[in-house]
Image (spheres, rainbow, N blue to C red):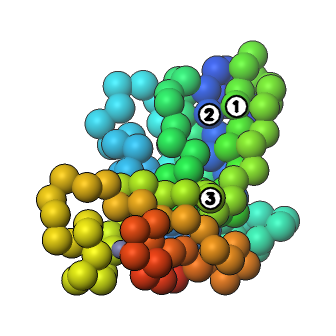
Amino acid sequence: MLNINSITKGIVIDHIKPGYGIRIFEYLKLDKANFTVALIMNATSRKYGRKDMIKIENVIDLDLAMLGFIDPNITVNIIEDEKIIEKINLSLPERVEGIIQCKNPRCITSEERGITHKFVLLDENKGIYKCEYCDQIYSWEG
Ligand SMILES: [Zn+2]
């Protein structure tokens, strides 16, 4: 069993919903990383039963809004000298830009090219977003 101490300096993405680790791994392009990375699938978790984890032996820029949108239950641990120096609990982001597309054919983002699709969170518990331009509703499905 790998543990936190196996990382000296880097990032541990924890409490990933089982099956989502690979999506995040690919989103972060970690398959092409030239530093040590580990994707741990179906680890036992006291909190959630099962979880995926990603360990990154490097400090990289993370788009926390995007990660929160993929899985709002994630915890990001920043590791230095083998210790957690920062713990970030993610949630569904207030705004998402350029991630999801508005499906309304009359929306300006459908009619004109080159406009960034923007959504605003309406209801965090239900994961409801609305398009900033036309109010079209988007339901987040984890
Ligand atoms: Zn729209």
Q: Are marks 3 and 2 in contact (CB under 8 Å)?
A: no
Disc 1, SS: strand
Disc 3, SS: loop
Instruction: Tell me the CA gap for discs 3 and 1.
Output: 23 Å
Is tag 3's residue or tag 2's residue first in the polypeptide sequence?
2
| Badge 2 residue CB within 8 Å of ligand 1 | no
Q: At label 1, which amino acid type do we have? A: Ile
Task: Please identify, in this view, whether the residue under mark 3 or under mark 1 is nearer the observer.
Answer: 3
Mark 3 crowdedness (10 Å alpha carbons): few <14, some 14-19, many ≥20? some
Q: Residue 34, image x and y in percent?
A: 35, 25
Q: At label 3, which amino acid type do we have? A: Glu
Which residue in the protein does label 1 denote? 78
Q: At label 2, which amino acid type do we have? A: Ile
In which quadrant will I find the C terminus?
bottom right
Q: Residue furthest right?
A: 46
Mark 2 crowdedness (10 Å alpha carbons): few <14, some 14-19, many ≥20? many
20 in relation to 28, above or below:
below
Q: Residue 11's mark?
A: 2
Disc 2, SS: strand
Q: Residue at x 62, y 46 (%)?
A: 13
Which residue in the protein does label 3 denote? 94
Q: In the picture, residue 22 is in which quadrant?
A: bottom left
Q: Residue 130's mark?
A: none
Closest to the observer, 77 or 89: 89
Instruction: Tell me the CA gap for discs 1 and 2.
Output: 5 Å
19 in relation to 69, above or below:
below
Is tag 3's residue or tag 1's residue first in the polypeptide sequence?
1
| Badge 3 residue CB within 8 Å of ligand 1 | no
Q: Residue 113, image x and y in percent?
A: 15, 59
Task: Please identify, in this view, whether the residue under mark 3 or under mark 2 is nearer the observer.
Answer: 3
